[in-house]
């Protein structure tokens, strides 16, 4: 249901004359999330990821998951549900698994949803998009650590040169993986991407008389483009916090986002998004900033977790390689 809504809404935006169809925060919001998260990284993160070039690259890639839409039926049917999760007002996924205790795998998540006459494609699987991307970034960092250590402890000029070349390649791969993943972390700060009330209140009890109008795309796209600046968002970034384990961090993040659904509809009812009101701007900037802050914190958590990874086969601990106790050159070149 959600995939068809998003496609129809995007087509409507295109017909209104916008330069590109958009979902989630639209290209402006996603770029701000990616760039500001990189600019806010602490000094412990490798220097190659804390440069203006890296910030620009992540910002450029952040909208990519939306640009990929329309690639084909097989692609869209699999990937469109990656952008959202239909959280009910009781913080379960459509009356099935609770957001606070999701199954470890998407397969089990899908099985549990089928017990309540749904599935991962109708309910969306955004939590798993975030967790999967975190796992991949952690592995990317692990290989980067190995290349740095390998170059440091290399016994031959040839080995040193191999590690140096591989490190360059790993940095490019890491930037791409991080840029694509940043989109889904950003989706998680948009309240209408974590709620059953994703485009108007819908067929639910509505004692406050919230709108049933299609408010999703106009807010995330046109309003953000016209009313919100990177300076607005930067001023609303929150202090760095620990983000572990990733499953709890993700659940808490999405629960906090879902808690902003009613405040959004109250502001919409009051006309806060009809023009750039102070209340509408502050609310929107705070939600985009929540995405940038979370992305920053998850990147730091992935860096910390990467030291406990292993690489190659048979597996070699990254910590042993960094200590000069093992050389994985042959395993990595295989």
Image: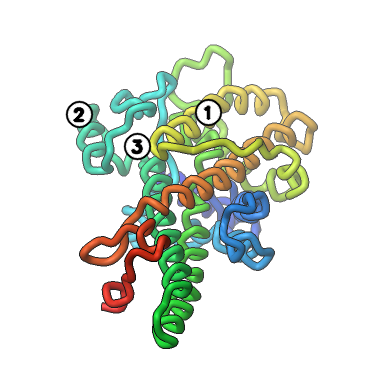
Few, some or many residues within 10 Å of mark 3 (<14, 14–19, 20+): many
Q: Position of residue 137 (x, y in %)?
A: 43, 56
The numbered disc on residue 115 is: 2
Residue 325 lies, with reference to residue 122, above or below; the image says below
Name the secondary structure under disc 3: helix
The numbered disc on residue 256 is: 1
Mark 1–mark 3 CB contact (< 8 Å): no
Question: Residue at left 52%, top 54%?
Answer: 11
Q: In which quarter of the image is the C terminus?
A: bottom left
Mark 2–mark 1 CB contact (< 8 Å): no
The answer to which of 172 and 218 lies nearer the viewer is 172
Which of marks 1 and 2 precedes in the sequence? 2
Question: Residue at left 64%, top 22%?
Answer: 266
Residue 273 located left or right of residue 44: right
Residue 21 lies, with reference to residue 232, above or below; the image says below
Residue at the disc numbered 3: 123
Which of marks 3 and 2 precedes in the sequence? 2
Which scheme is used to colour this image of the protein?
rainbow
Question: Residue at left 57%, top 60%?
Answer: 46
């Amino acid at each position: 249901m959600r995939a068809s809504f998003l496609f129809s809404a995007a087509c409507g935006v295109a017909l209104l004359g916008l330069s590109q169809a958009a979902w989630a925060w639209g290209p402006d919001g996603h770029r701000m999330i990616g760039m500001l998260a990189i600019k806010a990284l602490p000094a412990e993160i490798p220097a190659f990821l804390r440069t203006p070039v890296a910030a620009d690259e992540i910002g450029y890639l952040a909208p990519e998951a939306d640009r990929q839409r329309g690639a084909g039926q097989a692609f869209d049917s699999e990937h469109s549900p990656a952008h959202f999760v239909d959280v009910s007002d009781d913080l379960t996924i459509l009356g099935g698994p609770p957001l606070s205790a999701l199954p470890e795998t998407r397969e089990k998540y899908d099985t549990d949803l089928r017990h309540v006459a749904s599935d991962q494609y109708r309910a969306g699987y955004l939590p798993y998009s975030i967790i999967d991307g975190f796992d991949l970034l952690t592995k990317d960092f692990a290989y980067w650590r190995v290349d740095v250590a390998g170059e440091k402890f290399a016994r031959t000029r040839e080995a040193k040169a191999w590690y140096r070349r591989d490190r360059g390649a790993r940095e490019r791969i890491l930037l791409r993986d991080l840029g694509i993943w940043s989109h889904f972390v950003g989706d998680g700060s948009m309240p209408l991407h974590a709620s059953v009330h994703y485009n108007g209140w819908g067929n639910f009890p509505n004692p406050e008389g919230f709108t049933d109008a299609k408010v999703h795309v106009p807010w995330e796209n046109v309003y953000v483009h016209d009313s919100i600046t990177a300076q607005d968002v930067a001023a609303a970034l929150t202090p760095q916090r620990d983000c572990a384990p990733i499953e709890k961090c993700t659940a808490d993040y999405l629960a906090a986002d879902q808690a902003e659904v009613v405040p959004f509809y109250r502001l919409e009812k009051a006309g806060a998004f009809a023009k750039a009101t102070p209340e509408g701007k502050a609310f929107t900037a705070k939600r985009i900033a929540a995405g940038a802050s979370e992305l920053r914190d998850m990147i730091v958590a992935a860096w910390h977790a990467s030291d406990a990874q292993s690489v190659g086969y048979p597996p070699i601990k990254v910590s042993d390689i960094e200590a000069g106790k093992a050389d994985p050159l042959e395993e990595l070149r295989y």
